[in-house]
Image: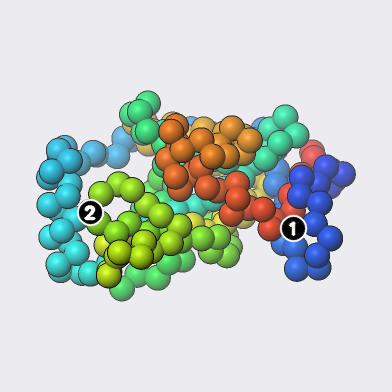
């Protein structure tokens, strides 16, 4: 998009000089394809909780990193969200390995979930700032944007990072997942559909001003 121009649309009209400006590109700038499905863990909820307890005993706090990736559609910012088995939604990302940094872990997960192969050297991802952290006080699915007062030690932490897209990119997604572009206005406070973490993304983005790059 060498001839791209910045749209006059500015969704967050901040006057502060501390405002972060993010360029976002139209959805049509990107190619979407599929690759071999990622194997699922065949386990019950009880099995999952027991696995988490075992991992916690061995490694301590479980930390996951997830990507906030934005595109433009119909003059409105849209969030890229994975839909798994047509049943639930999640942000691209996953659990860190022991001793792995946030940035390295998120790049590894994005290569695995959204790139042609997980060893692609020409498919770098630009990881931006951490937008927020969510905490789970127990081995359950409920997360909070703070550590509850009755919690002595959180069991899981999920960190959300802004990921900046270039003017073009290929997204190659496992066949058992769908990558959807969902408008921020639909996500906001829609905990029932998207869960608390995804539903909280629009508020995390309130300090960011979006500039749409038009082709």
Callout 1 touching callout 2 (CB < 8 Å): no
Mark 1 or 2: the one toward you:
2
Q: Position of residue 113 (x, y in %)?
A: 40, 45
Residue at (42%, 40%) from the top-left corner?
Answer: 195
Left or right for 24, reference 215 = left
Spatial CA span between label 1 and label 2: 37 Å
Residue at (57%, 39%) from the top-left corner?
Answer: 188
Residue 180, can we see it?
Answer: yes
Q: Position of residue 14 (x, y in %)?
A: 80, 57
In this rendering, is residue 161 above or below 3?
A: below
Mark 1 vs mark 2: which is more N-terminal? Answer: 1
Residue at (33%, 48%) from the top-left corner?
Answer: 142
Residue 213 appears in which quarter of the rendering?
Answer: top right
- Is the residue marked by circle 1 packed among few (<14), some (14-19), or many (20+) residues within 10 Å? some
Location of mark 1 (residue): 21
Q: Secondary structure at mark 1?
A: strand
Residue at (48%, 44%) from the top-left corner?
Answer: 198
Looking at this view, name the residue that lies furthest to the top: 86
**Screen quadrant of the N terminus:** top right
């Amino acid at each position: 998009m060498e001839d791209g121009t910045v749209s006059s649309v500015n969704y967050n009209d901040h006057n502060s000089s501390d405002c972060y400006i993010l360029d976002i590109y139209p959805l049509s700038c990107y190619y979407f394809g599929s690759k071999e499905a990622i194997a699922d863990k065949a386990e019950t909820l009880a099995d999952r909780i027991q696995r988490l307890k075992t991992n916690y005993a061995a490694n301590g706090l479980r930390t996951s990193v997830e990507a906030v990736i934005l595109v433009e559609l119909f003059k409105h910012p849209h969030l890229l969200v994975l839909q798994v088995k047509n049943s639930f939604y999640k942000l691209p990302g996953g659990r860190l390995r022991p001793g792995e940094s946030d940035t390295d872990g998120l790049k590894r997960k994005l290569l695995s979930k959204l790139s042609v192969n997980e060893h692609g050297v020409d498919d770098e991802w630009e990881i931006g700032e951490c937008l927020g952290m969510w905490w789970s006080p127990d081995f359950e699915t409920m997360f909070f944007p703070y550590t509850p007062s009755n919690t002595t030690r959180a069991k899981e932490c999920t960190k959300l990072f802004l990921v900046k897209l270039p003017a073009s990119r290929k997204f190659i997604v496992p066949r058992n997942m769908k990558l959807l572009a969902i408008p921020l206005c639909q996500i906001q406070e829609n905990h029932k559909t998207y869960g608390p973490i995804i539903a909280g993304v629009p508020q995390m983005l309130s300090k960011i001003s979006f500039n749409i790059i038009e082709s």
